[in-house]
Image: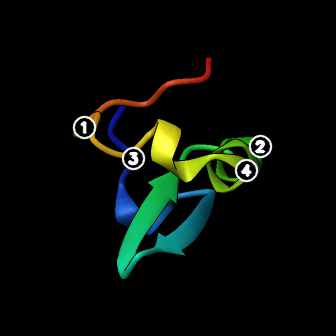
Amino acid sequence: MQVDEKKAAATSVYKGTTYYFCAPACKVTFEKSPEKFIGKAGTHAGH
């Protein structure tokens, strides 16, 4: 899933990279286990 940076519901910085999220709950899920999502360029898992 691609999220427009200007319309992102939440952001998180991990290892110097800013990640943009469609919803605050997605940010929380990412922050619990970011390595699970890194490396899946351009994809969004969890829904």
The chosen color scheme is rainbow
- The number of numbered discs placed on residues in the rendered structure image is 4
- Residue that mark 1 sits on: 42
Q: Nearer the viewer, mark 3 or mark 4?
A: 4
Q: Residues within 10 Å of mark 1 (few under 14, many from 20)?
A: few
Amino acid type, mark 2: Ala
Marks 3 and 1, Cα distance to the nearest angstrom? 10 Å
Residue 18 position in % (x across, y down): 40, 72
Q: Residues within 10 Å of mark 2 (few under 14, many from 20)?
A: few
Residue 40 occupies which quadrant of the picture? top left
* 38 left or right of 21 in image: left
* 36 left or right of 4 in image: right
Marks 3 and 4, Cα distance to the nearest angstrom? 20 Å
Q: Secondary structure at mark 4?
A: helix
- Residue that mark 4 sits on: 32
Amino acid type, mark 3: Val
Does 46 appear above or below 9?
above
Q: Nearer the viewer, mark 3 or mark 2?
A: 2
Task: State the residue at coordinates (56%, 67%).
Answer: 11
Amino acid type, mark 4: Lys
- Residue that mark 3 sits on: 3
Q: Earlier in the sequence, mark 3 or mark 2?
A: 3
> Circles 1 and 4: CB distance less than 8 Å?
no
* 44 left or right of 24 in image: left
Q: Earlier in the sequence, mark 3 or mark 4?
A: 3
Q: Secondary structure at mark 1?
A: loop
Marks 1 and 4, Cα distance to the nearest angstrom? 19 Å
- Residue that mark 2 sits on: 25
